[in-house]
Image: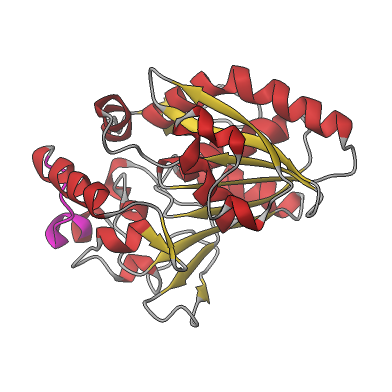
Amino acid sequence: MLDYAAAAYYCRTSACEAWACSACSRHPRTEVRRVYDNVHNGNGFVGWDPVEGVVVVSFAGTDTTSVANWIDDLDEVKTPWPLEGCQECKVHAGFLTTYSALRPQLQPLVEALVRDHPQAPVWVTGHSLGAALAVLCMVDLLSLSYPVRAVVNFGQPRVGNQHFSSFVAAQSASLSLCFYRLVHHRDPVPHLPPASFGFHHSPFEVFYTKNETYYHICDATGEDKHCSDHYLIDPSIKDHLNYLGVLFGGEEVEGRLQELMHSTGWEMEASVLVSAS
C-alpha cells in the first residue's frame, strides 16, 4: 500500500498515467487512470494491478504550494455525511468538498474495473489529506456495494466526529475489512483537527517510532493514549513526510509546511495539543 500512496503524488500532472516513478517501478504492470480537480487540488488514481490482482484507489496528500488546498484543510467545520446509514455522522467539510469533486471521475472508473475483474478486492490508500479522502472513499464505495477489503493510510488526520468514527469501525468489523492508519512517531497531522473540535479517529492506529522495526497496534478506541496521542510535544513535520523510508516531500515542502502552519496560527504547540486531547 505504501508504494501506491507514494505514487499518487505523481498524479498532480498527466505523468501519473505514464506510471514512471520509483514506487511505480515496483508494480510495473499496473495500469492507472488519473483523477483530479483543479479547483480544490484533489489528486489520485484508480488502477488495476494484475500481479497483486487488486483494484487500487490512491489519493495524493496535501499540495503545500496550493493555497486552495490548504484553505480546505484548515476549514475545520463539520458537515453531515450525505449518505444513508450513518445517523448523526459529521465529517470535515473541506475533506468532503475535495472528495465530492473527485467522485464523478472516480466512481465510474472503479465500477468499470470491478465489472472487468469481479473476483478482485478493492484497496484504498492515501497519505496526509489523501488519507482523509481514502476514508471517505471507503465509506462511499461500500455504500455502493463495491468489494473494499483493505484501507491502509499514512499520516491521516481526523476525518469526522465520534459517530462517524464508530460507523467506520463497525463497517470494518462487519466486513472483516483491514483498516489501519500508520502514524510515524511525532507526526503532527494525526492530531488534527483537534479532538476538542469534536473530531475523533477510527481504529486501528499502527504506531511506530524512529525504530522502524518496532510497531504497536493500538486499542479499539481510535485514540489510544499510549500511542501517538502520548507524543503531543515537539512535533516533527519530517516524521509526517517520511513513512517507512519513503519520502513524501523534500526540504522545500517541509519549509512551506512550517511557514503555513506558523502564518495561519495552526502551530503544533504543546499547550494546544495537550488541551485538545
- Where is 233 relative to 252, above or below? below
In the rendered image, residue 42, in percent from the top left (x then y), is placed at 45, 29
Q: Is residue 271 magenta?
A: yes
Q: Is residue 88 magenta?
A: no
- Where is 245 relative to 20, above or below? below
Residue at point 84%, 44% (across, down): 120
| Relative horizontal placement of residue 237, taking residue 49 as reference (left or right) | left
Q: Residue 166 or 106: which is nearer the viewer?
A: 106
Q: Is residue 137 visible?
A: no
Residue at point 34%, 51% (across, down): 249
- Where is 96 relative to 197, above or below? above
In the rendered image, residue 199, in percent from the top left (x then y), is placed at 38, 44
Number of marks = 0
Residue at point 53%, 46% (across, down): 7
Looking at the figure, which quarter contains the N terminus? Answer: bottom right
- The scheme the figure's colours follow is secondary structure
In the rendered image, residue 61, in percent from the top left (x then y), is placed at 42, 42
- Looking at the rendering, the stretch of residues picked out in magenta corresponds to 265-273
In the rendered image, residue 133, in percent from the top left (x then y), is placed at 50, 37
The quarter of the picture where residue 147 lies is top right
Residue at point 44%, 26% (across, down): 98
Q: Residue 57 or 25: which is nearer the viewer?
A: 25
Looking at the figure, which quarter contains the C terminus? Answer: bottom left
